[in-house]
């Protein structure tokens, strides 16, 4: 699943872009899109700044009220955001500046669906080449790209969450478990264990009615009633992988 953000101050333009994405998805059923619409660029940047949202692809109008899309893209890059940016605009005036912020594409409105599909093909091919998926997380006031595969498990520690990675490193995040799970649930390898853990099924060594053993040596005791649904999710995950 790919997260796609649309940012334009005109509702009609948002609907047009979303319609083209829906049409593309019908023709390419191997892809799933989670689309978010923004009419306020500051709201989008605020969510990114707070580490609550980071899309894989951002379609953004250059002429936004209060802040040019180019300036918004510069802020995004300063925050460490690595998403693919496609500028949609009525003018070629900012084309050079667009590529200075590492924009993936610059499309002049009105955008034809055929042209849009060619660009989307290219973007998705680039994303598919990244076999490893990454999670953007704010650690020590900087956004870091954490490889999803490397996350062994996450543990609630009061108001923070601790992420344990395969190489033995740990990262403490100032966010709720619910918010962290919202970022991870799109990946089928993650499962909740009670209210205190999120585990990566790909790092589970063994599982029984009382506990599961992670491949880093950690034992996690199972709350009452959690074994059967977790066991089912575990086997479903490996069946799908095969």
Image (cartoon, helix red, strand yellow):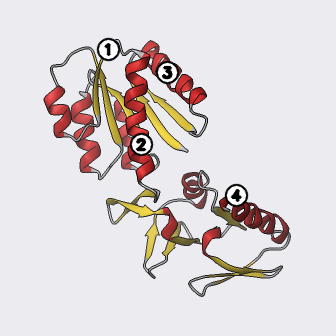
Q: N-terminal of the two: label 2 or label 3?
A: 3
What is the distance, in whole Å, between disc 3 and disc 1 at their CAs?
A: 14 Å
| Left or right for 95, reference 23 | left
Helix, strand or loop at mark 3:
helix
Residue visible at 79% across and 74% down? 223
Helix, strand or loop at mark 2:
helix
| Left or right for 200, reference 12 | right
Relative height, residue 27 to residue 79 (above, below): above
Relative height, residue 221 to residue 239 (above, below): below
In percent of width and height, residue 167 lies at 44, 80
Helix, strand or loop at mark 4:
helix
Task: Single out the residue that lies furthest toward the bottom.
Answer: 217
Residue visible at 59% across and 61% down? 177
Q: Quadrant of residue 119?
A: top left
Check disc 4 and report the residue beneath it.
240
Q: Nearer the viewer, mark 2 or mark 3?
A: 2
């Amino acid at each position: 699943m790919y997260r796609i953000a649309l940012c334009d101050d005109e509702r009609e333009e948002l609907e047009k872009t979303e319609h083209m994405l829906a049409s593309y998805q019908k023709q390419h059923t191997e892809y799933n899109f989670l689309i978010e619409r923004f009419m306020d660029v500051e709201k989008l940047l605020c969510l990114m700044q707070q580490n609550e949202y980071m899309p894989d692809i951002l379609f953004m109008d250059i002429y936004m009220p209060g802040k040019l899309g180019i300036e918004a893209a510069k802020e995004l890059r300063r925050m460490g955001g690595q998403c693919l940016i496609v500028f949609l605009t009525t003018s070629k005036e900012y084309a050079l500046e667009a590529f200075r912020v590492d924009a993936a594409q610059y499309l002049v409105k009105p955008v034809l669906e055929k042209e849009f599909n060619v660009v989307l093909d290219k973007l998705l091919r680039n994303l598919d080449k990244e076999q490893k998926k990454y999670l953007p997380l704010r650690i020590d006031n900087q956004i870091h790209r954490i490889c999803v595969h490397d996350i062994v498990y996450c543990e609630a520690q009061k108001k923070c969450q601790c992420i344990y990675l395969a190489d033995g490193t740990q990262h403490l995040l100032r966010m709720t478990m619910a918010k962290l799970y919202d970022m991870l649930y799109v990946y089928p390898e993650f499962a909740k264990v009670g209210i205190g853990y999120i585990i990566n099924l790909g790092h589970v060594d063994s599982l029984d009615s009382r506990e599961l053993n992670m491949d880093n040596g950690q034992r996690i005791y199972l709350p009452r009633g959690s074994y059967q649904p977790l066991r089912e999710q575990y086997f479903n995950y490996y069946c799908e992988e095969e």
